[in-house]
Amino acid sequence: MARPKKDKELKHKHQIMLRLTDTEYEIVSESAKAAHLPLAEYVRKQIMKQKVTAKYEIVADLPELKKLVAEFGKIGSNLNQIARHFNSGGIHSQEMRRAIDQSVARIYEMKFEVLKMAGDFHSAARGSLDGNTETHSK
């Protein structure tokens, strides 16, 4: 089955020749790939000042990140045990209160560590971007 024909008003029938250096071409080409757009469509949107959203997936294999994930797992397990204890009619004790307070304090510490690491990654990624793009991480 053939592709349906575009309306005459929607056809791109005018061409503009543009010469780029190897570096400029690489930057534009990579930006188009990041935005999941064909090169011509990306350049057309940039020229017409339309919003172009580039999406980057940041993959990091850092020991600090693995440590934080393990800590989150331990804290989650502790909180599940506490919830199970309370849901089964268990009484509140000073030891239980202390464990809850420690878990909550550690969660806030880890949140700060994660935000700091995310800020470092964001700064590094942001320094390499030019133009009218936004970055999003999955």
Image: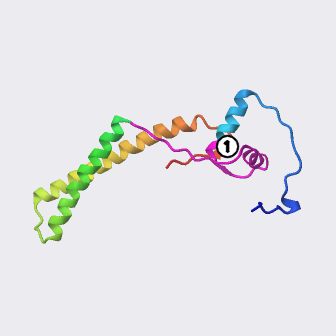
Q: Position of residue 84 (x, y in %)?
A: 18, 65
102 or 125: nearer the viewer: 125
Residue assigned mark 1: 32
Horizontally, residue 98 falls left or right of residue 61, namely left
Residue drawn at the location 16% of the way across and 58% of the way down: 97
Q: Is residue 71 above or below residue 2?
A: above
Q: How is the image coloured?
A: rainbow
Q: Provide the residue span drawn in magenta.
A: 33-61
Element on which disc 1 rests: helix
Image coordinates of residue 29 in percent, x first then y, are 69, 38
Q: Is residue 11 above or below residue 39?
A: below
Q: Nearer the viewer, residue 79 or 42?
A: 42
- Residue 38 in magenta? yes
Q: Nearer the viewer, residue 114 or 80?
A: 80
Q: Is residue 90 left or right of residue 105?
A: left
- Give the image quarter of residue 88: bottom left
The image quadrant that residue 91 belongs to is bottom left
Judge from the rendering whether residue 127 lies leftward or rightward of residue 42; answer left or right: left
**94 to 67, vertically: above or below:** below
Q: Is residue 103 magenta?
A: no
